[in-house]
């Protein structure tokens, strides 16, 4: 019999029941809850007279709607100016009180984007099943966990039963061999993978990321990579546990300690695919060939190396793709054949569950240190992923670097990634963004998003147009 | 949940690939704490010319006359013909809520994003994946004949065209049963509470660190 993949092992160890009809009951170890996708789930519990199965398996934190300007943030929930947002955040607080669930309040130093907070607090751990009503839950797969987004009905199902009814996915290995060039990051790897397999390439699969490039990545980088599995169509992405994982997890507030730590580490040593495991699909990339990436269109697969030129619909035969490229160029206000480096962002956003961890902020600060944001850039926002990230960044003086460069230093939250709070693009504005989706209207009605790494966003902020951060770093040193 | 057995209705087009859930229901409407009322904002950025806000009276907003769902011939449609990777992006269940609230009971496309596909079944909306060539043909037939109605028979797993052609489709047995009977799957799962407890008891002994309490 062939060996098991990491996904097979995680699935097997959480299988409560396999049913004859092909579905399975899977146990869920952790659920993260935020204000946007949970109110209807709590309401469902209430209407059915049900209670949470295991209160202590859940952690709630508001992130999508929270204001990031200190002026508005300092007053807590009651001071949120948008009444609809305020009600939603207040409703999360009320629901957690009613059902006795732990939440980090809006101004708790531990508050932040759920997918930054979970690993940072040791709330999500290797070997766990982790869910949240948010598609970027795939982030936690970086810990060697089975983690994926769910809808609100399933949030309610997990609250009520601590399980989910699931169908097993197929296995895909994405192997990135070799090493990365200087200036090329996990974000570029993620975008290059999506460029290669497309936004539906991973549909129906659980992706495991492997290869030397992934083994060499920090945990922050691995989280960025797993985070964007969903942009490749896969609900979950995961990475084998190794010393990097253990070093990251050890000592986190909710991580096991003492004897329990030793027991856990012994069990986690099996959290990798067996050597003779068989994947349904294997995709390979060579690390040295990956260049800094910039999306030009309205889907994450519309991505090019920074020195690329935009596609010409006239040269595309497939009618569906031709139509999509034509529409995307029109929406983005860009010309076929023009260069990525000619695109001039009006705003820059450094943040989101993809790229708001300390390493991301360091990379951005390295680029802007001693420089100024270009006059043509109206706003450059830096939004740390959590209160803890913010505190760490300030201890390192990164906030002063950003402020001196003319950037704004904000309070933690999802912010301009999806513009549910006041941080948004105006119609027609281009944004160099470290977030994960460049869909039409995603960052604001009529807004035009270009997905890039933190270093590339920072360099674009200073240059006033996209530049190859590899040259930039050479020149700057 | 509303059961789905046989449904006949007018078909309407969403003729583009990779329709994401932001396009199906933009984020400003996700601030609602309710489960209903999303229909008027379905495809908001395509349907209207202005930027929609929560709580607005949509009947007074300027319509995009070029958007097919605004054509009189598609008024009252309940079956949506769509393209590859429909429902990609965010996990928001507000997307199927909006489709259902608008009146769609069934979506036919060559492929769907996983989370969206799953969310549909929880809301009495049947997503049907058919070969791209077949979907192409349905689009052609629909464009060619005003009032084009399809019948979807979940019991027999068939899409039936106006000229009587029967197209078989696949659907997972459990999801099919839940939809046919309109079952509440939390209730079903709770019937297995003993099995869940037995699993928990084993895990608490074998892997106690998984039960570290969030307190």
Image: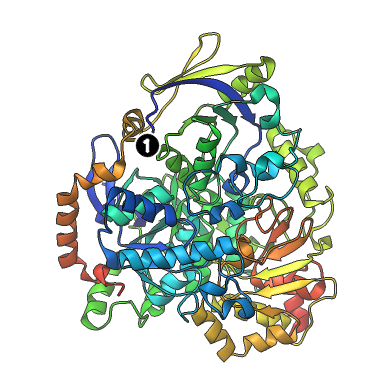
x and y, in percent, of residue B180 in the image:
34, 28
In the image, residue A44 sits, relative to residue B179, either above or below, namely below
**What residue appears at the point 53 percent right and 18 percent down from the top-left corner?**
B150
Q: Using the image, name the chain to which the residue with label 1 belongs.
A: B
x and y, in percent, of residue B170 in the image:
41, 27
The quarter of the displayed image where residue B206 is located: bottom left
Classify mark 1: helix, strand or loop: loop
> What kind of colouring is applied to the model shown?
rainbow
Q: Is residue B16 left or right of residue A253?
A: right
The quadrant the C terminus of chain B occupies is bottom left
Q: Is residue A213 left or right of residue A297?
A: left
In the image, residue A109 sits, relative to residue A457, either above or below, namely below
Residue pointed to by mark 1: B1
| Closer to us: B9 or A210 | B9
**What residue appears at the point 49 percent right and 74 percent down from the top-left corner?**
A106
**Dot 1 surroundings within 10 Å: few (below 14), some, or many (20 or more)?**
some
**What residue appears at the point 24 percent right and 39 percent down from the top-left corner?**
A19
Total of numbered circles in the picture? 1
In the image, residue A327 sits, relative to residue B131, either above or below, namely below
| Closer to us: B116 or B75 | B75
| Closer to us: A435 or A425 | A425
x and y, in percent, of residue B212 in the image:
26, 72
The quarter of the displayed image where residue A190 is located: bottom right
**Any part of residue A214 in sight:** no
Extreme-top residue of the structure: B163
The quadrant the N terminus of chain B occupies is top left
Q: Is residue A262 left or right of residue B90?
A: left
x and y, in percent, of residue A301 in the image:
64, 50
The quarter of the displayed image where residue A454 is located: bottom right
**Any part of residue A288 in sight:** yes
């Amino acid at each position: 019999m062939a060996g098991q993949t990491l996904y097979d092992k995680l699935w097997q160890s959480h299988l409560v029941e396999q049913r004859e009809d092909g579905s399975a009951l899977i146990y869920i170890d952790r659920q993260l809850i935020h204000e946007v996708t949970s109110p209807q789930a709590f309401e469902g519990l209430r209407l059915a007279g049900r209670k949470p199965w295991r209160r202590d398996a859940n952690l709630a934190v508001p992130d999508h709607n929270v204001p990031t300007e200190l002026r508005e943030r300092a007053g807590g929930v009651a001071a949120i100016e948008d009444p609809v947002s305020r009600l939603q955040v207040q409703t999360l607080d009320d629901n957690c009180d009613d059902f006795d669930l732990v939440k980090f309040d809006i101004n708790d130093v531990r508050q932040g984007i759920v997918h930054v907070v979970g690993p940072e607090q040791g709330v999500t751990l290797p070997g766990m099943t982790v869910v949240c009503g948010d598609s970027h839950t795939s982030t936690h797969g970086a810990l060697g966990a089975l983690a994926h987004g769910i809808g609100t009905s399933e949030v309610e199902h997990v609250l009520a039963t601590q399980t989910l009814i699931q169908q097993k996915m197929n296995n895909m290995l994405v192997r990135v061999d070799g090493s990365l060039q200087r200036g090329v990051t996990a974000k570029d790897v993620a975008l290059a993978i999506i460029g290669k397999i497309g936004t539906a390439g991973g549909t129906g699969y659980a992706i495991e990321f492997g290869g030397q490039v992934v083994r060499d990545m920090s945990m922050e980088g691995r989280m960025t990579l797993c985070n964007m599995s969903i942009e490749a169509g896969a609900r979950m992405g995961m990475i084998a546990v190794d010393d990097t994982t253990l070093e990251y997890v050890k000592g986190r507030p909710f991580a096991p300690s003492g004897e329990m730590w030793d027991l856990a580490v012994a069990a986690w040593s099996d959290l990798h695919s067996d050597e003779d495991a068989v994947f349904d699909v294997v995709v390979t990339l060579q690390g040295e060939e990956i260049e800094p990436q910039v999306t030009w269109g309205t889907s994450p697969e519309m991505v090019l190396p920074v020195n690329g030129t935009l596609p010409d619909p006239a040269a595309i035969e497939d009618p569906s793709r031709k139509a999509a490229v034509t529409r995307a160029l029109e929406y983005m206000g860009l010309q076929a054949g023009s260069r990525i480096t000619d695109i001039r962002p009006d705003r820059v956003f450094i943040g989101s569950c993809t790229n708001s961890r300390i390493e991301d902020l360091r990379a951005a600060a390295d680029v802007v240190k001693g420089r100024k944001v270009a006059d043509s850039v109206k706003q450059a926002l830096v939004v740390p992923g959590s209160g803890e990230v913010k505190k760490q960044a300030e201890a390192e003086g990164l906030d002063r670097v950003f402020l001196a460069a003319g950037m704004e230093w904000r309070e933690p939250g999802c912010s301009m990634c999806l513009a549910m709070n006041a941080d948004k693009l105006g119609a027609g504005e281009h944004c160099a963004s470290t977030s994960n989706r460049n869909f039409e209207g995603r960052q604001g009605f009529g807004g035009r998003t270009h997905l890039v790494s933190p270093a590339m966003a920072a360099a674009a902020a200073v240059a006033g147009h996209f530049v190859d951060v590899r040259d930039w770093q050479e020149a700057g040193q | 949940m509303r059961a789905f057995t046989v449904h006949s209705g007018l078909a309407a087009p969403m003729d583009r690939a990779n329709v994401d859930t932001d396009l199906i229901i933009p984020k400003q409407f996700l601030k609602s704490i309710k489960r209903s009322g999303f229909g008027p904002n379905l495809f908001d950025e395509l349907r209207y010319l202005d930027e929609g806000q929560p709580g607005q009276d949509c009947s007074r907003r300027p319509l995009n006359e070029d958007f097919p769902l605004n054509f009189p011939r598609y008024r009252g449609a309940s079956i949506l013909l769509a393209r590859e990777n429909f429902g990609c992006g965010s996990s928001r269940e507000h997307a199927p809520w909006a489709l259902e609230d608008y009146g769609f009971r069934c979506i036919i496309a060559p492929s769907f994003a996983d989370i969206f596909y799953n969310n549909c079944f929880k809301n009495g909306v049947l997503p049907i994946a058919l070969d791209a060539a077949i979907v192409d043909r349905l689009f052609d037939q629909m464009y060619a004949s005003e009032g084009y109605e399809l019948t979807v028979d979940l019991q027999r797993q068939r899409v039936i065209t106006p000229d009587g052609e029967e197209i078989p489709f696949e659907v997972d047995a459990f999801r099919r049963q839940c939809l046919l009977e309109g079952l509440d799957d939390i209730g079903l799962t709770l019937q297995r509470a003993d099995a869940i407890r037995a699993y928990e008891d084993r895990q608490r002994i074998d892997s106690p660190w998984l039960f570290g309490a969030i307190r």
